[in-house]
Image: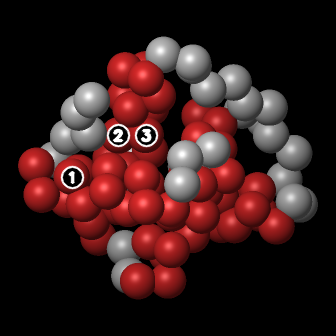
Amino acid sequence: MSLEQLTTIDAIKQFLEGIQAVAFNIASDKKERYSWLQSVLVKPRFMQFGKADKGVITRYLLKVTGYSLAQIKRLIRQYVKTGIVSW
């Protein structure tokens, strides 16, 4: 399974728990990583989730991108405020 197929909260939870095997390759280019991060926030409609599910998405982004919690939170705030993640 690839990252693009993780479209539901349940699938992401399984990935975080180590139940779901996933092959992923995040681009080394900052622009591409931010674009991927934005697509993750847009695809599952991040704004409509409750607090617990937003936490799952945040943990997922932490694990896959390797960014710090502060960086992920900053990028999510930027997305919530403007609707885009820019570099």
Q: Is 80 displayed left or right of 46 in the figure? A: left
- Residue 49: quarter of image: bottom left
Distance Cα–Cα, label 1 vs label 3 = 12 Å
The residue carrying mark 3 is 37
Which image quadrant: the N terminus? top right
Q: In the rendered image of this protein, does residue 64 appear above or below residue 9? A: above
Does dot 1 land on a helix, a strand or a loop?
A: helix
At horizontal 21% and vertical 52% (from top left) the residue drawn is 78
Lower position in the chain sequence, tag 1 or tag 3: 3
The residue carrying mark 2 is 38
Distance Cα–Cα, label 3 vs label 2 = 4 Å
Q: Position of residue 52 (x, y in %)?
A: 50, 83
The residue carrying mark 1 is 78
Pick the front one: 68 or 11? 68
CB under 8 Å between callouts 1 and 3?
no
At horizontal 59% and vertical 34% (from top left) the residue drawn is 4
Q: In the rendered image of this protein, does residue 63 appear above or below residue 65? A: below
